[in-house]
Image (tube, coloured by chain):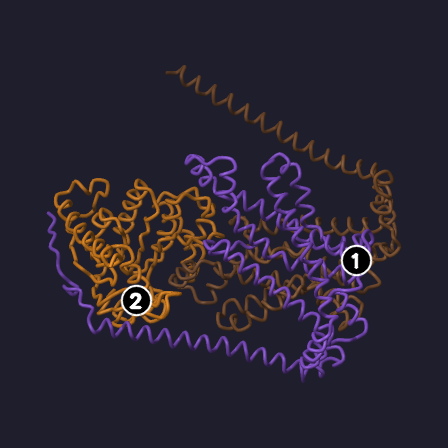
């Protein structure tokens, strides 16, 4: 009897340590493989350049690194970066605020929503990029058209997902709350808004790249400043290192912002991840 | 102790009485009337709103902004008719659709292939997942100047950018779709004797199909975005080229005409894909959003 | 609680505009403090009765009244425990239990105290800070029940509250429900498919016909209280009652099948 228990315990302990060890080995292997991928990629890039392909096409890791370093020390670069960040940031604020507010005011009114819905669908299916020239035409080549383009990119994703968030709040939850004695407004505040929150927050997170894209697209079309301008200008000089460095800077900004906004989704830890409509725009 | 004394309370025989019929008729009529009213409000409201917007654009917009910059619906319409009767517009449409369409097909094919590779080699997937996530979130259109520098002014950079815009979305959604097939379904099929290829063809593919189709559906407009953006930067034909050149010449009606054409194209292709989806997956009621 | 000659017809979504009769000429009255169960085949309109009393829907004909007043709009003086537990997923268990009191403007200290008391009554102590998704099905049910009973409404509607639970948990929860009911004595209208459950809990059982739902028979359950739900089936008279209830339901299920086949 006792020895059977001891045996059982030993078997359990053995299995546990075995599977723990196996998992640890596996994790280390995966990590090593990831590092290897990065190293090999850079090494291959360095070797291939000049040997397989002309450096004109792919530049070299060293040249791109040099360009990045040079930018880091130049006030000129930070001026451009600030411009793009300002356009993206303002556009993000404008687009997401309008998206949440308009969705909120419409989602709770069925008929009103159905009246405007076809127009939103049409506007949504126009690729926002196509509107870039219009905004430039209207608002010149300064900051404003980029802000508006970024806002436009952000608005629809936030709008659609906020509406979706309100829609998927279970009816039963609302009804039970009403029967409990909650007023209409109280139900909105205590049930509808928190219920829609995971969708709203997820939309706010995925639209960060969208805002950057909006700003950069605006700069591509017409601008004399910003990171998009830097990329285009480098392309004009056939400086591959410059274009790649600009792309890396943009990617780094977007990744940093995504990481910075990750706590947003932790704020709704009562709910597993939600599926968004419309997809990210990156 | 227990007295079970059934008391008949309701009507003893199934009397689908005149009263019941009366109620049924009243409710049917009431619902019909209410639905008609709602439909009327919605359609009427939509029509009115649309008319108001068009009228404001036609007559009121000039008060807010220089009419030169806002044009007007009638001008845009005239320009559309004018463009459509010439050959040039059709060439622009053909160019953009060729770029976006080719890029789209390449992107979808490569995305699907990549998904199957990743799913069948879990170790590879684990190694590459952080790179995929990073690549997923970087703005791909930032690569447009690079592509143009590499491949010049022709179709190639546009096709590649369109494909790149599509590829990752299809890849990520397909992997998620395949992974989200309930393990129970796979196990049951195994027990029933399905294995290998049969399992892939009859269980896994159809199971992941809704997610895959949804990603295929939402990505066409992204292919268009890629193509148009590349045309903005450097092109000699295409709708993006048409729009951006017109905007530099302050030819507002052409800009809007181009946008209308793009919207119609995107909506038509989306409609076609949706139709195809319904044909292929009739059992799929609610599609997944990517 | 009273229904007087109530008819309810619906037009099902996407089914054209022909209405279907869910309830036909339903009348009954509940005495204060009475525990009534509604049993009948699926889709016979039992839940419709509850929704009418909660004021979520209005009768197509006849009158639904509550405490002598016709029900107009949402009935806020009644408790409703639905089949889904409908706890707010973003609130901890404690905050969910307090929610109704909060909505009704009970001061914080008082509602906290009352909530703790009820939580202890059903043995949920120690799980106050858990989110609903971290609780088991039985725990969620308990939380759902006490958060409705806690505001002491004179009547409570329960729609198959124990439906999705496993057989053992069901019996335990039935027992706990009876304890709570003995203590607070609300009028209860309880919808269930489980005949043993109906017998164990109720003072009266109403059997329903298949669609359109009509009250077929009314049974008084005179088993002594307090009841021991674990041994209810050993009491004399249980089997006879069970058999006649089952006879009623079986006839209706058969009728439904013939309707469908016809």
- Residue C20's disc is 2
Give the colour of chain C: orange
Element under disc 2: strand
Q: What is the chain letter for disc 1?
A: B
**Neighbours of disc 1 within 10 Å: few (<14), some (14-19), many (20+):** some
In what quadrant of the picture does the C terminus of chain C appear?
bottom left
Element under disc 1: loop
Between C55 and A148, the one nearer to me in the picture: A148
Looking at the image, residue C161 sits to the left or right of residue A63; the answer is: left
- Residue B185's disc is none
Q: Residue at x 76, y 54 (%)?
A: B156
* Residue B135 in the image, given as x and y percentages of width and height: 69, 47
Above or below, A25 relative to C254: above
- Which chain is displayed in purple in the rendered image? B
**Residue B122 image-quadrant placement:** top right
- Which chain is displayed in brown in the rendered image? A
**Neighbours of disc 2 within 10 Å: few (<14), some (14-19), many (20+):** some
Q: Residue furthest top?
A: A3
Q: What is the chain letter for disc 2?
A: C
Residue topped by disc 1: B154
Looking at the image, residue C7 sits to the left or right of residue B110; the answer is: left
């Amino acid at each position: 009897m006792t020895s059977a228990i001891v045996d059982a315990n030993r078997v359990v302990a053995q299995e546990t340590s075995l599977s723990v060890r196996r998992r640890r080995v596996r994790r280390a292997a995966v990590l090593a493989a990831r590092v290897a991928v990065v190293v090999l990629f850079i090494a291959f890039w360095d070797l291939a350049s000049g040997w397989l392909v002309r450096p004109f096409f792919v530049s070299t890791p060293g040249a791109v690194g040099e360009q990045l370093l040079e930018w880091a020390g130049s006030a000129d670069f930070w001026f451009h970066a600030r411009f793009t960040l300002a356009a993206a940031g303002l556009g993000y604020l404008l687009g997401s605020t309008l998206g949440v507010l308009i969705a909120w005011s419409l989602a709770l009114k069925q008929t009103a929503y159905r009246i405007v819905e076809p127009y939103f669908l049409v506007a949504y299916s126009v690729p926002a990029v196509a509107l870039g020239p219009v905004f430039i035409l209207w608002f010149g080549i300064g900051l404003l058209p980029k802000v508006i383009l970024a806002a436009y990119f952000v608005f629809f994703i936030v709008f659609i997902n906020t509406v979706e968030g309100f829609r998927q709040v279970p009816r039963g939850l609302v009804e039970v709350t009403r029967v409990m004695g909650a007023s209409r407004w109280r139900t909105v505040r205590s049930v509808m808004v928190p219920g829609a929150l995971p969708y709203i927050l997820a939309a706010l997170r995925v639209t960060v790249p969208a805002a950057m894209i909006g700003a950069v697209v605006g700069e591509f079309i017409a601008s004399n400043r910003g990171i998009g301008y830097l990329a285009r200008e480098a392309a004009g000089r056939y400086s591959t290192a410059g274009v790649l460095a600009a792309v890396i800077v943009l990617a780094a900004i977007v990744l940093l912002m995504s990481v910075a906004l990750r706590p947003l989704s932790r704020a709704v830890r009562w709910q597993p991840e939600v599926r968004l409509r419309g997809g990210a725009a990156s | 102790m227990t007295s079970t004394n059934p008391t008949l309370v309701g009507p003893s025989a199934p009397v689908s009485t005149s009263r019941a019929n009366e109620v049924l008729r009243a409710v049917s009529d009431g619902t019909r009337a209410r639905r008609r009213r709602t439909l009327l409000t919605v359609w009427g409201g939509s029509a009115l709103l649309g008319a108001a917007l068009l009228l404001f654009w036609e007559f009121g917009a000039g008060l807010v902004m220089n009419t030169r910059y806002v044009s007007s619906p009638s001008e845009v319409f005239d320009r559309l008719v004018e463009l459509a009767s010439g050959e040039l517009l059709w060439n622009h449409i053909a160019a953009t659709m060729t770029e976006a369409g080719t890029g789209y097909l390449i992107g979808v094919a490569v995305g699907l292939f990549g998904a199957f590779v990743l799913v069948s080699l879990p170790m590879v997937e684990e190694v590459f997942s952080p790179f995929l996530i990073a690549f997923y979130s970087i703005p791909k259109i930032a690569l447009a100047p690079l592509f143009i520098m590499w491949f010049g002014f022709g179709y190639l950079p546009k096709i590649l950018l369109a494909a790149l815009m599509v590829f990752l979305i299809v890849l990520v959604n397909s992997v998620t779709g395949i992974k989200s097939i309930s393990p129970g379904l796979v196990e049951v099929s195994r027990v029933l004797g399905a294995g290998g290829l049969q399992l892939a063809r009859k269980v896994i593919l159809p199971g992941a199909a809704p997610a895959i189709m949804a990603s295929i559906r939402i990505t066409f407009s992204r292919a268009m975005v890629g193509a148009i953006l590349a045309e903005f930067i450097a092109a000699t034909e295409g709708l993006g080229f048409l729009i951006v050149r017109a905007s530099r010449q302050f030819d507002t009606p052409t800009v809007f005409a181009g946008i209308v054409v793009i919207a119609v194209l995107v909506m038509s292709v989306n409609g076609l894909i949706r139709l195809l989806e319904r044909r292929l997956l009739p059992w799929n009621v609610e599609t997944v959003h990517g | 609680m009273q229904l007087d000659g109530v008819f309810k017809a619906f037009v099902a979504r996407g089914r054209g505009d022909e209405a279907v009769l869910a309830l036909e000429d339903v009348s009954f009255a509940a005495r204060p403090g009475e525990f009534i169960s509604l049993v009948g085949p699926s889709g016979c309109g039992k839940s419709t009765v509850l929704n009418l009393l909660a004021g979520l829907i209005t009768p197509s004909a006849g009158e639904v009244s509550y405490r002598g007043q016709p029900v107009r709009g949402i009935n806020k003086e009644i408790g409703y425990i639905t089949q889904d537990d409908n706890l707010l997923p973003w609130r901890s268990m404690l905050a969910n239990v307090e929610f109704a009191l909060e909505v009704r403007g009970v001061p914080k200290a008082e509602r906290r105290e009352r909530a703790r008391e009820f939580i202890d009554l059903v043995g949920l102590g120690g799980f106050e800070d858990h989110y609903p998704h971290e609780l088991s099905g039985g725990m969620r049910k308990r939380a759902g029940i006490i958060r409705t009973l806690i505001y002491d409404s004179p009547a409570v509607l329960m729609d198959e509250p124990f439906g999705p639970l496993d057989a053992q948990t069901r019996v335990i929860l039935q027992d706990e429900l009876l304890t709570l009911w003995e203590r607070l004595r609300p009028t209860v209208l309880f919808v269930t498919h489980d005949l043993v459950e109906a017998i164990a809990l109720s003072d009266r059982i109403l059997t329903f016909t298949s669609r359109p739902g009509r009250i077929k028979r009314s049974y008084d359950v005179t088993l002594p209280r307090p009841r021991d739900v674990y041994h209810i089936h050993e009491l004399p008279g249980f089997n006879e009652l069970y058999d006649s209830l089952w006879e009623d339901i079986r006839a209706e299920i058969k009728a439904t099948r013939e309707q469908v086949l016809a």
